[in-house]
Structures are given as C-alpha cells and as structure tokens.
Image: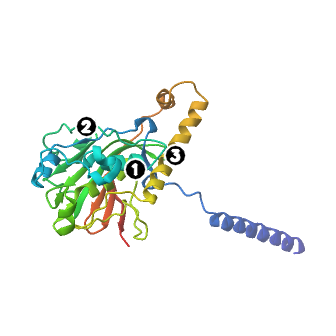
C-alpha cells in the first residue's frame, strides 16, 4: 500500500505538471500574422516619377465653366505654380512635399481613351490616367465623388503598385475648376481639391479620419470646400512611405554593382510570379468611405 501510494502521488504530480505546461503554452500568444489588407501600398522607387495622363473630357468641363477648351492655368498668386495648369499644379504640390524625390512628371499629356471604360478592370491598360465617367459603376453605387483604382503585386512587407487610375463621378455630381463658383454654390465640388486628394491615393496613401489633423487625405469633401494645398501631415506621410523604399535600394546597391532595376529583376528570378491584387479607395460626399481589395470590403470608416 505504501509503494502504491507513493507511485500514485508521482503519477498525479506528473499529470499536474503536464496540465500546467499545456495551460502555459495555451496562454502564449502566437505571433500576429500581418494581414494583406494592412500592408502599405506604394510604387517601386524606380517607377517614380509617374506619368499621369488627363482625359480630354476635363477640357470640356473647363469650357462649361466659361473658359477655353484648354485646362485652366493656376492662378498667378499661387507663386511657383503659375506656369502650370491646375492638374499639373496638384501634381507639383506632391512633388514639393518631399525633398528626396519627385512623384509626377508634370508634362502629363492627354489620356488616349476617347470613351470611358464600363468596367474597372478595363482601366488596367498600361496608361495611368485621370478620367471622368457619366456611366458610374453599379458595383460601387451612389455617394462616391471619385475613386482611385489600383493594381498591385503582393510582396513580403508591402503591396507594390503596378498600375493606377483616378476616376471622377460625373453622373451624380457637378464639378468646377472655378474656385469662386465652388465656394458660392452648394451644387459644385472643387475638382482640383478632389484630384489632389486622389493623387495621394495614387501614390499609396490611405485616409486620415481625424478632423484635428490638417490633411488633404481627410476622407470627406464638402460642396463648398476648396483644399488645394497639402499640410505638414501629408508631407510627413508621403516621405515616410517612400523613405523605406529608398533605404532598401541603398542596401541593394551596396551589395551589387548592377543597376537597381537589374538587381530587382534578379531577385525575382526563379520565384513564383506575385499575385496581382485589384483594389479601389472611395472619396465620398458624406465622409463614410470604403476600401476594397479583390471585391471584398477591407476598410469601412467614417470621419470624426
């Protein structure tokens, strides 16, 4: 009986020890996997600056405003911008936000497509453009002023953009290049303000939803609002997004005498071709904006 008692106690202690170990392991959190929806979105450094072409229908909008068929020039009191049209001015604002690089080629030219596409996938045509459409997409629905549609390759720590377009909703809303008309009317939305916001998305920036932060990436634009300048937050955001790219390229160059593009190509040799992801980001009149990837809603937020 004595030996059985000791043996039984040893078994009980062993079982207890195992249970303690199992409970301890169950309490240890597994490393959190980074969701693809949380990955930063950006272009390869060597793809910059982007050449973004503007659809011809924007000239027609300018004619409606009572001006010529050409895109309007920036106002003379805008300083260094007065040699550019308003589309170029919005692109130059992003160029000026970062001393380390230029994001856009300012001689944008005109987008080739005469007729707007009816499906977002059709915009993946090798030409980055700013478009308008009076046949808004049924899959997106009402309330959306404009979207930025993008195609990106999935990488380890980011989504590498390979194509993007800005598309403005002319079916449901009226837009104007005329700042005074926008401010005096509740009917018109300031088109340069919309484009400046969407260009941020085209570079990979997401929304900031805090009303206390002065940013063009705030996800709401009122019909009388004019926001044609970037804030400090915008400059900091775009610099931080691409500074990681720059550091990675410097590291690659330190280990190779080949060009950056060639080193990138060599790194991809023998690997499975990355998956192409299609997404878009909304700018809504009511500030309730949504982000989609491959047809699924990944972010749904309201301004506050």
Q: Quadrant of the N terminus?
A: bottom right
Q: Which residue is mark 2?
A: 125
Residue 161's x, y, as percent?
38, 43
Earlier sequence position, callout 2 versus callout 1: 2
Q: Which mark is residue 204?
A: 1
Residue 188's x, y, as percent?
17, 63
Along the viewing direction, whichever of 288 and 17 lies nearer the viewer: 288
Q: Quadrant of residue 2?
A: bottom right
Q: Quadrant of residue 302?
A: bottom left
Q: Which residue is mark 3?
A: 243
Along the viewing direction, whichever of 227 and 29 lies nearer the viewer: 227
Please determine whether, in this image, residue 149 is positioned above or below residue 268.
below
Q: Residues within 10 Å of mark 1 (few under 14, many from 20)?
A: many
Q: Residues within 10 Å of mark 2 (few under 14, many from 20)?
A: few
Report whether residue 298 is seen. Answer: yes
Earlier sequence position, callout 3 versus callout 1: 1
Residue 259's x, y, as percent?
50, 26
Q: Residue at image x 35%, y 57%?
A: 229
Earlier sequence position, callout 3 versus callout 2: 2
Residue 105's x, y, as percent?
34, 38
Whether residues under marks 3 and 2 lie with C-beta atoms below 8 angstroms apart, the answer is: no
Q: Is residue 111 left or right of residue 212?
A: left
Q: Residues within 10 Å of mark 3 (few under 14, many from 20)?
A: some
Q: Is residue 50 left or right of residue 22?
A: left
Find numbered disc 1 in the image and state the secondary structure of the residue it sits on: loop
In front: label 3 or label 2: 3
In front: label 2 or label 1: 1
Find numbered disc 3 in the image and state the secondary structure of the residue it sits on: helix
Real-space Cα distance between discs 3 and 2?
29 Å
Q: Is residue 187 left or right of residue 272?
A: left
Real-space Cα distance between discs 2 and 1?
19 Å
């Amino acid at each position: 009986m004595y030996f059985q008692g000791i043996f039984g106690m040893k078994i009980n202690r062993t079982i207890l020890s195992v249970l303690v170990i199992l409970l301890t392991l169950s309490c240890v959190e597994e490393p959190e996997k980074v969701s693809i929806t949380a990955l930063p979105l950006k272009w390869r450094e060597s793809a910059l600056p982007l050449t973004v072409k503007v659809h011809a229908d924007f000239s027609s909008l300018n004619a409606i405003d009572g001006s010529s068929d050409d895109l309007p020039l920036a106002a003379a009191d805008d300083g260094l911008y007065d040699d550019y049209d308003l589309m170029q001015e919005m692109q130059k604002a992003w160029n000026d936000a970062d001393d380390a690089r230029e994001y856009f080629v300012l001689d944008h030219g005109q987008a080739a497509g005469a007729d707007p596409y009816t499906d977002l996938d059709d915009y993946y045509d090798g030409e980055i453009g700013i478009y308008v459409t009076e046949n808004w997409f049924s899959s997106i629905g009402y309330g959306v002023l404009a979207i930025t549609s993008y195609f990106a390759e999935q990488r380890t720590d980011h989504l590498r953009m390979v194509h993007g377009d800005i598309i403005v909703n002319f079916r449901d809303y009226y837009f104007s290049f005329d700042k005074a008309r926008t401010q005096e009317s509740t009917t018109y939305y300031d088109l340069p303000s919309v484009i400046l916001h969407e260009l941020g998305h085209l570079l990979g920036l997401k929304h900031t939803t805090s009303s206390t932060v002065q940013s063009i990436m705030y996800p709401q634009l009122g019909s009388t609002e004019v926001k044609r300048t970037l804030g400090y937050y915008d400059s900091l955001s775009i610099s931080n997004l691409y500074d990681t790219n720059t550091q990675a390229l410097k590291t690659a160059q330190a280990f190779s005498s080949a060009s950056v593009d060639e080193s990138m190509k060599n790194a991809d040799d023998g690997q499975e071709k990355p998956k192409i992801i299609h997404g878009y980001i909304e700018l809504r009149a009511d500030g309730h904006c949504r982000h989609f990837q491959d047809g699924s809603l990944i972010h749904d937020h309201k301004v506050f």
